[in-house]
Amino acid sequence: MSKVRNINSIQVFDVVSRLKSITLAAQSLNISQSSVSYHIKKLEDELQVPLFDRKPEGLTPTSQGKVLASHVESGLRSIQTGLEQISGQAEAVRVAILPMFASRWLSPRLGDFWEAQPDIQLSFRNHNNTFAAKERPNDFADLGILWGLGDWKDFQTERLWSEKMVVVCSPGYLRENPITLAAELKNRALLHVDDESRWQEWFANNQLEYSPSQAKLIPQEPHFQLSSTMNGLGVALFPQSMIQGELETGMLINPFGRTFETSFAYHLGIPNGVSLSRSAIVFKNWLLSQCRD
């Protein structure tokens, strides 16, 4: 059985695998580049496997290196959690959050959480649905909110609720561009923030052909998409749960007077290999209970 005789080599390996550079790792650890190279070579010799492919543009973890990196990261995170617990420090839970989900759904409920759990710190990391696409998502957050189909291979996911989609536009846009039939959207400006998959699904579910040329890409910020819709730039497709206020006040109009089924939903996602702290588990269970309620 392979034995690692120097725990420092494991710590150096963790930094190199994250930064993919001997130079950057040396700067981060405040040691020489030769010391970093020595620890990596020593670890590879002890394990008798290559951990990195050396290329001109930098280091790329081998398949064995990727496996080791995931276990090392989880182990170091677990050690840090243990140190925080025995030292009495408050544990900070890193939560990847979608801006609209945060402002429309989570923010009104957070007061109840902190009233019940005053010692738990939450560190929110905004992302525009890029959490699952990050090369090392567990460097970014312990858990987070994702929007999509729930098919992220490197995550454990749980659907928060079954969503309904609603087609909306401003009253002014509707006056100038009447919409009574689904087919009429083929001649309207369609707004979206990430890719066109929501509109593609909507058109397919309504037995219509989708024309990508009519879609207008709004920078990846759903609040900007919302304001652009209210300002009459086009028609948008939103989760109903996020725009109830605008529909009730008449700032947005639902021209069809109904909602539409969708395969998309909000999910709680936990990167594979993450060992949740006690505080993270408390927050996760609270979040899921709020969704059930």
Image (tube, helix red, strand yellow):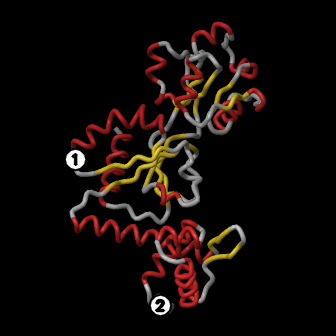
Distance of label 2 from label 1 (alpha carbons)? 43 Å
Q: Could you tell me which residue is drawn at 22 percent across and 45 percent down? A: 116
- Name the quadrant of the C terminus: top left
Q: Could you tell me which residue is drawn at 46 percent across and 72 percent down? A: 30
Q: Could you tell me which residue is drawn at 65 percent across and 27 percent down? A: 191
User: Which labelled disc corresponds to residue 135?
Assistant: none
Q: Amino acid at mark 2?
A: Lys
Residue located farthest toward the top when viewing the structure as drawn: 175
Q: Position of residue 48 (x, y in %)?
A: 59, 89
Please tell me how crowded label 1 is: few (under 14), some (14-19), or many (20+) other residues with Cα within 10 Å: few
Residue 19 occupies which quadrant of the picture? Answer: bottom right
User: Which labelled disc corresponds to residue 118?
Assistant: 1
Residue 264 occupies which quadrant of the picture? Answer: top right
Residue 259 occupies which quadrant of the picture? Answer: top right
Residue located farthest toward the bottom when viewing the structure as drawn: 1
Q: Report if the CB atoms under discs 2 and 1 are less than 8 Å apart.
A: no
Q: Is residue 158 above or below residue 52?
A: above
Q: Secondary structure at mark 2?
A: loop
Q: Could you tell me which residue is drawn at 33 percent across and 50 percent down? A: 283
Please tell me how crowded label 2 is: few (under 14), some (14-19), or many (20+) other residues with Cα within 10 Å: few
Q: Is residue 28 above or below residue 32?
A: above
Q: Secondary structure at mark 1?
A: loop
Disc with the residue nearer the chain's start (2 vs 1): 2
Q: Between residue 202 and residue 99, name the one nearer to us.
A: 99
Q: Amino acid at mark 1?
A: Pro
Q: Position of residue 40 (x, y in %)?
A: 56, 81
The count of marks equals 2
Q: Position of residue 139 (x, y in %)?
A: 48, 60
User: Which labelled disc corresponds to residue 3?
Assistant: 2
